[in-house]
Amino acid sequence: MRPIHLSLRSLVILCVLCAPFLSPADELKVNIPPYKEFTLDNGLRVVLMEYRRLPLIEMQMIIGGGRSIEPDSMTGLASMTAELLKLGTTTRTATQIAEQVDFIGAMLNVGAGLDQFSVSSEFLKKDLDTGFALFADVLLNPTFPQEEIDRDRSQREAELTSYLEDPRSIAGVCYAKHLYGTHPYGRQAIGTRAGLARITRDAVKAFYNAAFVPNNAILVAVGDFSADELLQRIKSALGSWKSGVVPAIPNVSPATHAGRHVVMVNKPDVTQTQIRIGNIGVDIKNPDRPAIAIANSILGGGFTSRLMNEIRVKRSLTYGAGSNFAPARLGGSYTISTFTKNASVRVTIDVALEEVKKLRDAGISAWELGKAKNYLTGDFARDLQAPENLAAQIGMVKFYGLSENYLQDYVPNLRKVTLDDVRRAVKKHFHYDDLLILVVTNPAETKEQMAGLGTIEEVPAAQAIE
């Protein structure tokens, strides 16, 4: 049973959710607490923000590279290496790490994204000694036990098998693969059977040693601490982390799709078809992102969006429909997602495309513009009240080299967006004629419906996930 500390953590977070970050004077400024920046002798960048609304400390280490630097022959190596960090160190077994994290009601997470690795931990102020020791231990002293590698590989292979029974999982994996093609962003995050089979303990150790270097990392800490005292603790624990050669990171953006191409993933047993429509999106520094956020909110960013209204409310074709722009360092994704009965696949796709066309041709109304601005402003301010989100936002700014005032300027930049700005951004980034349309479906019931949408490629489900 978890100790009461976790309940306390949840309670204190709820108690501050009403403390606004927006300036009450004009609601145009976001009050970001001040922070201090340091660089250790080994090149590790450190950002410390004293944030005393909660008796919590959030620590997030961001390391450049992620899945984009794993070798093609060992797909899955990046995420497996990250996962193995907390499955055994020189002083703790996987069980001991899990038990100690659980005992203090902390969180300890690891991951490998498209552009970066992450190691994060959150714990109560009173548990700083234990929480920080666990954080530093999994970061610096992983041993990658062979039994944990074998267990993790088996779990991933089992999960790949389970994916084939889940049309939504198939759609997610296959959409990314066909969207990005041979670009590193298109690799299966969980790995492939062939790639997993090639991963050895030596390969994991070599990859960790090459990727996890302090001069390629940023540590962000937000919480109830003294910056000077925590800095000394960080220097003591992480100062001996040896710098190294920063791994080569891909710098070629994924290619945008031209024309319409339909990929039909053949799964004969499905009665409902998963639908993904989209193209390459924008990189995280794109100046159109405020206008894109507003337009996306109106098209498919919530329950009252146009897609939900037209596909679900008016026509009862689905339970859910939405759109999303996921930015990345080299260009992310633009995606419309929904599902429907096999018999109504074409009408659902047509309605979704018609809403994109309306957005491109007629733009949005002044009322929609104001509503979207209010929603996004409030959502942004609410998110920043949690130390975890605040640390993540600061880390994003530092990692991607965004403007130092990015967070403070986010709301003013949203407020400045005009109807013309939205119209221009929609024409440029919300593709209509150039689209990947992927469906996980029973072609015997739906292939004729696809006629006229674009070139058609059929992929057996058993081959769709490697």
Image (cartoon, rainbow, N blue to C red):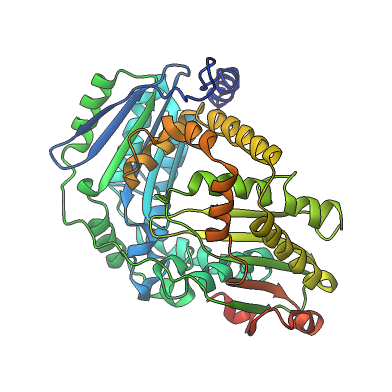
Task: Judge by depth and name the residue closer to the eye, 352 or 245.
Answer: 352
Q: Is residue 273 left or right of residue 151?
A: right
Identity of the residue drawn at 42% across and 68% down:
254
Q: Position of residue 100 (x, y in %)?
A: 43, 34
The answer to whether 423 is drawn above or below residue 165 in the figure is: above
Q: Along the horizontal axis of the image, is 23 left or right of 80? A: right
Q: Nearer the viewer, residue 94 or 363?
A: 363
Q: Is residue 126 visible?
A: yes
Quadrant of the image occupied by residue 137: top left
Instruction: Tell which of 102 and 166 is nearer to you.
Output: 166
Residue 84, located in which quarter of the rendered image? Answer: bottom left
| Residue 295: x %, y % from top left | 61, 48
Residue most extreme to the left: 41
Q: Does the rendering let one see residue 166?
A: no
Residue 196 placement, left or right of 300: left
Q: Quadrant of residue 276?
A: bottom right
Placement of the N terminus among the 4 image quadrants = top right
Q: Residue at x 34, y 34 (%)?
A: 220
Rendering coords of residue 409 (x, y %)? 43, 32
In-front residue for pair 69/197? 69
Q: Position of residue 71 (x, y in %)?
A: 33, 71
- Residue 286 in the image: above or below residue 164: above
Instruction: Answer with left or right where residue 248 lies relative to residue 55.
Output: left
How many marks on residues? 0
